[in-house]
Image (cartoon, rainbow, N blue to C red):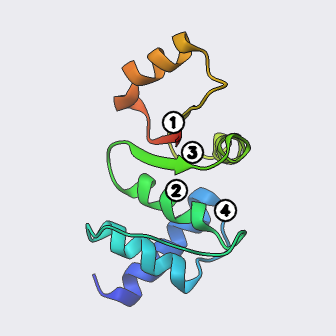
Amino acid sequence: MGSKNKARSLDKIAQSRFGYNRLHSGQKMAVEAVLDGQDTLAVMPTGLGKSAIYQLAAFLIPGVTVVVSPLIALQRDQLLAIADKDVGDAAMINSTIRERDRQETFENLQAIDLFYLLL
């Protein structure tokens, strides 16, 4: 698939599954790099849509996507934001999660699409 067709396809999926009007060029470049199997680091200002990058990639690539999040509040916001969308299952691990719930999350990791981890 050509890069223009791939970009249009990404925009279409981003709109239909996640409700984004369109992806910015930096978001498209990052998602395309991830889909091409490249290690990718996206450094963008707050509010420019970094979460769209890993949400879209996680939706398109089978298996669990690990998101290292710097803040518990950000983890919660991300889980709430995707809860109403048909994009897969998500879970988080941080210091507020009870040991029993943490263990259950790790035992069911294969069934999770987005896994938010606080380091």
Residue at 58%, 66% (x, y): give it: 50
Tag in front: 1 or 4: 1
- Which of these two is toward me, 56 or 4? 56
- Which of these two is toward me, 83 or 101? 101
Circle 1 is placed at which residue position? 89
Tag in front: 1 or 3: 1
Identify residue type, mark 4.
Gly
Circle 2 is placed at which residue position? 55
Instruction: Give the distance between the C-alpha atoms of the residues marked 3 and 4, in whole angstroms.
Output: 11 Å
Is residue 8 rendered to the left or right of residue 109?
Answer: right
Q: Earlier in the sequence, mark 1 or mark 2?
A: 2
**Quarter assignment of residue 39:** bottom left
Q: Earlier in the sequence, mark 1 or mark 4?
A: 4
Residue at 67%, 75% (x, y): give it: 45
Instruction: Give the distance between the C-alpha atoms of the residues marked 4 and 2, in whole angstroms.
Output: 12 Å
Could you say where residue 13 lies in the image, as x and y percent from the top left?
51, 65
**Quarter assignment of residue 4:** bottom left
Identify residue type, mark 1.
Asp
The quadrant of the rendering that contains the N terminus is bottom left
Residue at 58%, 77% (x, y): give it: 23
Residue at 67%, 62% (x, y): give it: 19
Identify residue type, mark 2.
Gln
Instruction: Give the distance between the C-alpha atoms of the residues marked 2 and 3, in whole angstroms.
Output: 11 Å
Identify residue type, mark 3.
Asp
Most extreme residue toward the front, as rendered?
Answer: 119
| Residue 86 tag number | 3
Could you say where residue 43 lies in the image, as x and y percent from the top left?
54, 74
Tag in front: 2 or 3: 2
Assign a secondary structure to mark 3.
loop
Crowding around mark 1 (Cα neighbors within 10 Å: few <14, some 14 to 19, many 20+) is: some
Crowding around mark 3 (Cα neighbors within 10 Å: few <14, some 14 to 19, many 20+) is: few
Could you say where residue 34 lies in the image, as x and y percent from the top left?
35, 67
